[in-house]
Image (spheres, rainbow, N blue to C red):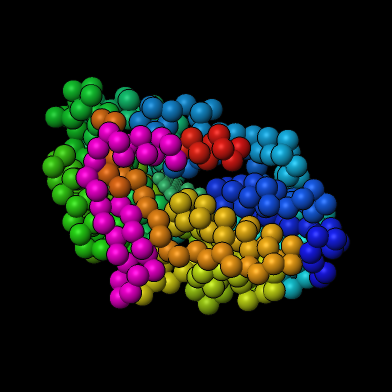
Amino acid sequence: MASGKNGPSETVLVLGGGIGGVVAANRLRRRLDRRHRVILVNRYPDFTFAASFLWVMSGKRQPSQVTRSLQVLKRRGIEVVIGDIENIDPVTRIITVEGKQLTADHLVVSLGADYSTDTIPGLQQAGETFATLDGAQRLAGAVKAVAQGRVLIVTASPLYRCPAAPYEAALLIDAVLRRKAMRGKVDIVVHSAEPGPMGVAGANVSAAVTGILAKRGIDYHPSHQITSAEAGHAQFADGKSETFDMLVYMPPIRLPAVVASSPLAGVTGWIDVDRNTLATEFPRVYAIGDNTQIPLSIGKPLPRAGVFAHAQALVVADNIAARIKGRPASSAFDGHGGCFIETGFGKAGYGSGDFYAEPSPAVTIRPPSRRRHLGKVVFEYNVMKRWL
Ligand SMILES: Cc1cc2nc3c(=O)[nH]c(=O)nc-3n(C[C@H](O)[C@H](O)[C@H](O)COP(=O)(O)OP(=O)(O)OC[C@H]3O[C@@H](n4cnc5c(N)ncnc54)[C@H](O)[C@@H]3O)c2cc1C
């Protein structure tokens, strides 16, 4: 492909209108002149900001406040195609959207992760999740109505989106109940499939979060994999069972179906990429965000988090734009990032550092404060107002 100032028009296809896709498309549009096409494809017409779903659950946000139409991107010169991607051919870079083919010179795949709640029989019927906007909205009503009993929160697999989210959910439910002066009548119990909160961030971060749960009287059971659920009753892998009045869950995840059935599915079961450039094994095909698996030195993968999808999107967009302009592609993702841990009462902690550090990620946690909560509000503002 010819490049440089007078080269031919090139087309960049961005698959997925979540954080990674939206940030990549915007950055590409800013970096490339209008001769070149930037096309974003997404299944649904709206972007929803998952990091705010917990605020929907706790009544701090209405669904409309965390939802934006992707059509706003058209004003900036990004073409938006709404439809189900049915096939991805990374060799020819031809994708099929509801029967129609689109061809890319450069392809960015940011299709997130599908929920595989069906792997735990009964979970979806007996419980509710804050990991979808509808679920978070239904939980808002349910949490408001709780007056007594037992709230059971589970992570249904050690692998899920956003390592902090289930622990934030427990703390935010606790805060809602304390505000209503109902906490004394409600037990909150967390059972996690993983051996500790945010384990990839290291023992200090894990211990700090466990300590916060304990201080708030939240009973915590690590390494306790749920295997099935039915009304009022959850079964675990070690044969033990728990009763509940309300079951709240973080769903397990799997590679989106359209990626799983394409040659992009790698040995990790996800899309394998160069950890610095996010390049796949296919020329001019990149993958970012939740649909990738980036192994870390400790054997666990880089957490699925919007901050990483966002940072990777900038790197990939800058490198594609540089290549189109005939310049060296020198941007690299360095594994730095951080995650807010909402603890309720207008406060949040913050775990951040270098996830690519050797021999293990160098991550520190800062205690809950009002300022850190405002940091998360700014993160939300940046995504919802700057990129959409
Ligand atoms: C409750 C919760 C709280 C979170 N909190 C935080 C937080 O505080 N901080 C943080 O950094 N991260 C947080 N995350 C994680 C963050 O939301 C994800 O890591 C981030 O959204 C990943 O971005 P992505 O672009 O990879 O995927 P996504 O944002 O999931 O976007 C993927 C897009 O692809 C589309 N798609 C999938 N398949 C197809 C198809 N076949 N055809 C067309 N379109 C398709 C989907 O509809 C979706 O729009 C949270 C997640 C949850 C669930």
Residue 252 in view: no
Residue at image coords 46%, 51%: 307
**Where is 73 relative to 366, above or below?**
above
Badge count: 0
Q: Is residue 376 magenta?
A: yes
- The spot of residue 251 in percent (x, y) is 42, 52
Is 171 on the left-hand or right-hand side of 268? left
Q: Give the range drawn in magenta.
A: 351-379
Compared to 69, does 290 lie above or below?
A: below
Q: Which of 22 and 77 is in front in this view?
A: 77
Work out which quarter of the rendered image holds the C terminus and state it.
Answer: top right
Front-lying residue, 271 or 242: 271
Q: As rendered, which of 300 and 353 lies closer to the eye?
A: 353
Residue 30, x across and y down, in percent: 68, 47
Q: In which quarter of the image is residue 186?
A: top left
Residue 307 drawn in magenta:
no
Quadrant assignment, res 1: bottom right
Query: In the displayed structure, would residue 159 be above or below residue 214?
Result: below
Residue at (63% x, 57% y) in the render: 317
The residue depicted at 78 percent of the width and 57 percent of the height is 11
Question: At 15% from the left edge and 49% from the top edge, which residue is drawn?
Answer: 211
Could you say where residue 169 lies in the image, as x and y percent from the top left?
A: 32, 41
Q: Looking at the picture, how far across and down is residue 42, in whole percent?
A: 67, 48
Q: In this view, does 179 lie to the left or right of 91?
A: left
**Whether residue 74 is visible:** yes
